[in-house]
Image (tube, grey):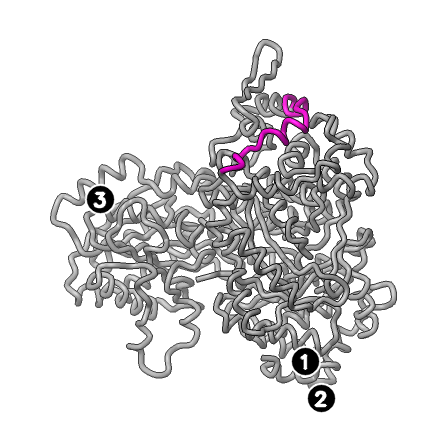
Amino acid sequence: MTYRHVVGPRTFVFADLAELMAKASPPRSGDRLAGLAAGSAEEGMAARWCLAEVPLADILARPLIPYEADDVTRLILDSHDAAAFARIAHLTVGDFREFLLTASSETLAAIAPGVTPEIAAAVSKIMRNQDLILVARKARVVTRLRNTIGLPGTLAVRLQPNHPSDDPAGITASILDGLAYGCGDACIGINPVSDSVQGLTGLLHLLAELIDRFAIPTQGCVLTHVTTTLEAMNRGVPVDLVFQSIAGTQGANASFGVTLAVLKEAHEAALAQKRGTLGDNVMYFETGQGSALSAEAHHGIDQQTLEARAYAVARAFRPLLVNTVVGFIGPEYLYDGKEIIRAGLEDHFCGKLMGVPLGVDVCYTNHAEADQDDMDTLLTLLGAAGVTYVMGVPGADDVMLNYQSTSFHDQLYLREVMGLRRAPEFAAWLARMGLTDADGVLLPGGGAPLLAAAPGLATTPELAA
Amino acid sequence: MSREDDPAAAWRRLAALTPARIALGRAGSGLPTREVLRFGLAHAQARDAVHTPLDVDGVRAGIAALGFESVVVASAAPDRATYLRRPDLGRRLDAASTAALAAAAAGDPVDLALVVADGLSARAIHEGAVPLLTALTPALTGAGWRLAPVVVATQSRVALSDAVGALLRARAVAVLIGERPGLSSPDSLGIYLTFDPRPGRTDAERNCLSNVRAAGLTPDLAAFKLHWLIDQALSRRLTGVALKDESDRLLPGPGPGAVADDARLTPPPSAGEDAARSGAGEGNPLPERSRAS
């Protein structure tokens, strides 16, 4: 179906919904690289105006990628909750924006199963940053494994203690430092250099023993390929959380070496481990705009819409954690701080609107036009938007992955400015350990109680291996 | 034990266990001033590495001093801003360069073409290319390989070497290229070796030596490994996943442990200069985070 919009003497024509949505996207380098971006600022606004008048029911009726051609489309449509959608079925995209601005948290939770990724992406394209923040803040998603993540007024942190050679002592040192800053309630998650089952096994045991030793109400994760984690589970290695990078098309997922069937198998295996104490959300997914284009599996669809489709994949497996790695892919997808900030807010909004526990890896690489000030801005905006969790990387410098994320200090800043607390079980543990006061404020002393409780780790960390 | 009673000493000991920025201290919720400035300096150096233009004349002079001819080429990316947004243009030669290389290849086919390319860090080339070539020269001359002129390439991605190698009718091409600068490694050089180069090759068809710099894989060791890989590539007529770097077996002693991490068998997805969009390279940006090899 062709879409048209008239602006004065000019008529803008959009061949189909995919083109309309792509041209309605706020500018970013990845859509230009793919040849999908609007040709002028005026065309971009004409597309947004036109998109605002499209009924949500039309978006649902016109899959951007055919049902027969893509298993993510099939997942979206087969699992669509028509009853939840009924409350918004009569709205246009423009109406939906206004509906969202006035909706209560309960209403947002009720419609979430009826919101497809294409609907979420469409409305996000006509929303300003403040709209994305305001609506996301109301959309709460709570998940549980060994603690409770996503409660209003809380922010969790993934402690990311990576090391360039997976050295157990070096990883342990970073974990202790992060715990001393009150990080780690989302999870303690290592990106390993090695993808071998042996390497994974050693790191999983390290995490399990550390978490047991201090009785930390949190979960460990080693971010290897799902098939490696499956193999580890088959060998009886303790796995709290199954990790996988996912994308919004079948082809892009294939380039990651995953299928929906493999994810289902891993999900069931992780549930069978029964390592949760409070809940059974056992999956952890990462996503990021541009991954489908990078895999040459984008079907002529803009990168932000495809990113939202990845959340439909995540949603099917009731994940504990999902985060977009918003500035990691590089400037050919998100060029500068402005594009990274916009994408981070869009991703977080779309995820929350769809009922997914979205966190954000607020990050950039050294060849992007971005710096710490941009990250401070995005982090602060996400704090206002109620982001589920962010990363805690020592000094914001990941010495294994060679990019800059958010630091142990950054989360302290955000808590102080926004009054955000940690997951309640984890907060209680920090207070019991003598690392924080009853209000969650770090006590002076440089984490001495933690070191005192772990003399072996502090003086002979190699034993931790 | 007194060390356990003194948190500062314990943290110093822990900090020595990792290059990660731990035990930084804090001023309220913020970093100490010293750490803010230290980070800012590292980022400034990495930014400069990305944006400093390649000193083509200086690099050519260094190459000439080693007794090699050189040819200068440019990719189809006209400037740095375009280069960063359009990796596809950085993989193609501009028209003038294509013509120049066709002229340079008027003679017989060669065994090896060497390309020195800015990639994402001209600094890595300024500081690392000549030391690497100096260490490699005895092996190059000793092996008796027919060599093409050394090609100096600007605004270049790894895959530009496919076009260069094909035009020069080289059996194999090795590109020395500035890697995406890390905060603590603005000078990191990558080397990608491709047998039977032609446009369309994927990263899975290359062998890579990463993190070549004084504080990483040293130029001498990198040259040793590269020589071994070239020799194997020419005799076995392949590069990529089927060619494992077993050069360590030729080294005396128990083998340098650190090398195993630095000298990867196939291109390390994120350590490359954001390299070719194929295979294990930038084709899969998210799994890079797990550095699956």
Mark 2 against mark 3, which lies toward the viewer?
Answer: 3
Relative image position of residue A348 (x, y in whole percent): 68, 45
Q: Which mark is residue B2?
A: 2
Residue under the image location 39 percent in, 52 percent down = B279
Relative image position of residue B186 (x, y in whole percent): 48, 58
Q: In the figure, A347 relative to A38: above or below?
A: below
Chain letter for mark 3: B
Label 1's element? Answer: helix
Relative image position of residue B167 (x, y in whole percent): 22, 44
Q: In the figure, A160 relative to B64: above or below?
A: below
Chain letter for mark 2: B
Which segment is the magenta one? A49-68
- Of the residues shown, which amino acid type is indicated by label 2? Ser
Label 1 sits on residue: B9
Which residue is the extreme one toward the left?
Answer: B108
Q: State if disc 1 and disc 2 touch (CB < 8 Å).
A: yes
Which residue is the extreme one toward the top?
Answer: A9
Q: Does the magenta-highlighted stretch encompass residue A56?
A: yes
Chain letter for mark 1: B
Q: Quadrant of the C terminus of chain A?
A: bottom right
Q: Nearer the viewer, residue B61 or B208?
A: B208
Q: In the figure, B161 relative to A184: above or below?
A: above
Residue B186 seen by the camera:
yes
Closer to the chain start, of discs 3 and 1, is: 1
Label 3's element? Answer: helix
Give the side of residue B200 with respect to residue A439, left or right. Answer: left
- Of the residues shown, which amino acid type is indicated by label 3? Leu
Label 2's element? Answer: helix
Residue B137 seen by the camera:
no
Question: Spatial distance from mark 3 to mark 1, Cα to Cα?
Answer: 60 Å
